[in-house]
Amino acid sequence: MTENDAMLNLWSATTPPSIQAPPLEGDATADVAVIGGGFTGLSAALHLALEGADIRLIEARSFGHGGSGRNVGLVNAGLWTPPAEIETMLGAEAGTRLNDALAVGPDLVFSLIERFHIACEATRNGTLHLAHSARGFGDLRNRHRQQIQRGAPVTLLGRAQTAERTGSEAFHGALHDARAGTIQPLAYVHGLARAAADSGARLHTHTPALGWSRDAGGWRIETPAGSLRAKRLIHATNAYDTVLPQARAFTPVFYLQFATSPVPEAQRGRLLPRGEGCWDTATVMSSFRFDRTGRLVIGGVGNPAGWRSSTHRHWARRKVRSIYPALADLDLEFGWRGRIAMTDDHLPRIVALGEDGISIFGYSGRGIGPGTVFGKCAAQWAMTGAPESFPLPLSRTRSDIMAPVKAACYDLGSLAAHLVGARLGGS
Ligand SMILES: Cc1cc2nc3c(=O)[nH]c(=O)nc-3n(C[C@H](O)[C@H](O)[C@H](O)COP(=O)(O)OP(=O)(O)OC[C@H]3O[C@@H](n4cnc5c(N)ncnc54)[C@H](O)[C@@H]3O)c2cc1C
């Protein structure tokens, strides 16, 4: 399994060819330059183009090369951190503002899908946060209470209801969030790119920014075959940046996924009949969902590179068996991994790069809704220059000197969890 082998990523294999976005050649200008073609950069490009702005986006590889084309596809509301904790961290007013802005993240995502006719397997029947243990159910109770206090349409399901909803006996209960849903993430990315281009954005793939600087004329971004000058700069490369020394501003955490061969129609009936996406309460988290063709997509924290690959693959097999014993013999036909930008407090960062420049990153594993929302906010910021466009204050980039150590802990911790599960015959 390699990070770049598109053949092994289910989403790459099932996404139709993209729009033409030729590399940038020569010296170009724009009012706004966007670096990075994932949810954040493309949402910014689309919303800027809709406002009639002169905008160019450059992407180092292809659209969705980063986390946006590798993720599970759970379009969840809010951040991973429960809302009350966010209000404690930021203060009541700022916390509420962020919570409110991201509670409607799925509304924005699904409305763009509808408005621009993006074919991305969109299913809005909610997601299920599953209790892997009695203690996990306690965590869900707490989340349920907090969300109900904020008027969210969430339902706590007991063991029997969860078994009926998932078709699995493996869980102690679940929290259903009706605001959420699932998408094929890479197809959503390509849909955003098409909508942005149709609205007037000029997009360039295979155009890495090699560096950037600012002078009296604004920003100048160097690329392999030219340069881009712009008044404002939006930098949206998250965990996949090839230039900025952001490595210590967040911990890069790997998340792996496998997809089985399609589950035969006769076996599908009771398995997630409403098509929710699922993730669990375990410390070493895992997730599962079905795609349009009935493949079970199963994922977990872990880096399956090199010698570690077989441990994680065995874990995935056991995980399938523990959730759906009848599917234990299905082949794992796809396997891929992606990098999550995890900040120390699990909150995203908006960092001023200098005058008229911002960098947005650190979604900590919850980026479909937040990336789309922050991209829209970035567009407003670029039109007005007002930092209040964001529901989160601009932050100084706080370097986390422990990031490399934490990254190693995540890798080794998930490896140990997946290995110990093997020894005990569990998951
Ligand atoms: C395996 C995995 C599973 C996940 N599951 C979920 C989920 O189910 N739900 C959810 O909400 N979130 C999920 N996330 C998180 C989510 O995918 C990310 O937060 C989100 O994709 C970040 O989007 P982005 O546009 O900010 O960055 P990215 O999608 O990473 O895009 C950054 C882009 O910048 C480009 N780039 C880098 N350097 C340069 C340069 N120098 N010049 C030009 N371009 C450059 C990269 O090639 C890349 O395409 C998951 C993440 C991973 C990795």
Image: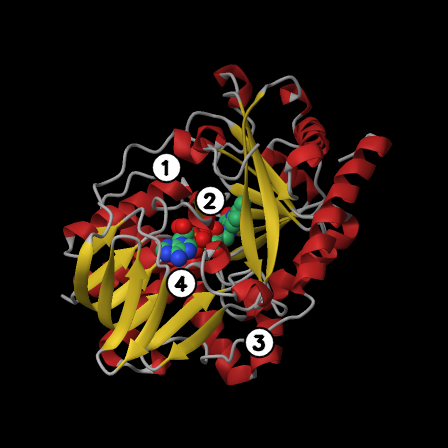
Task: Give the class, few, some or many, for how many residues have Cα within 10 Å of label 4's Cα (few <14, many ≥20).
Answer: some
| Disc number placed over residue 73 in the picture, else none | 2
Instruction: State the CA–CA distance, disc 2 to disc 3.
Output: 29 Å
Q: Is mark 2 within 8 Å of ligand 1?
A: yes
Alpha carbon of mark 3 to alpha carbon of mark 1: how far?
38 Å
The disc labelled 3 sits on which kind of residue? Arg
- Residue corresponding to mark 1: 121
Element under label 1? loop
- CA separation, marks 1 and 4? 20 Å
State left or right for residue 233 relative to residue 321. left
Amino acid marked by disc 4:
Val
Instruction: Name the kind of residue labelled 2 in the image.
Output: Gly
Label 2 or label 4, whichever comes before in sequence order? 2
Q: Nearer the viewer, residue 304 or 152?
A: 304
Q: Mark 2 and mark 4: span between their CA atoms?
A: 17 Å
Most foreground residue, 327 or 215: 215
As drawn, 118 above or below 319 = below
Q: Counting residues from the N terminus, which is met first, the one under dot 1 or under dot 4?
A: 4
Residue 298 picture location, percent across and down: 59, 35
Find numbered disc 4 in the image and state the secondary structure of the residue it sits on.
loop
Q: CB atoms at circles 2 and 4 under 8 Å apart?
A: no
Q: Measured along the vertical axis of the image, is residue 325 above or below residue 196?
A: above
Q: Closer to the N terminus: mark 3 or mark 1?
A: 1
Residue 249, position as x, y percentages in the image = 57, 68
Give the quarter of the image for residue 379.
Answer: bottom left
Mark 4 lies on residue: 104
Is the residue under label 3 in contact with that under label 2 (CB below 8 Å)?
A: no
Which circle marks residue 398 in the picture? 3
For the residues marked 1 and 2, what is the alpha-carbon distance in whole angstroms? 10 Å
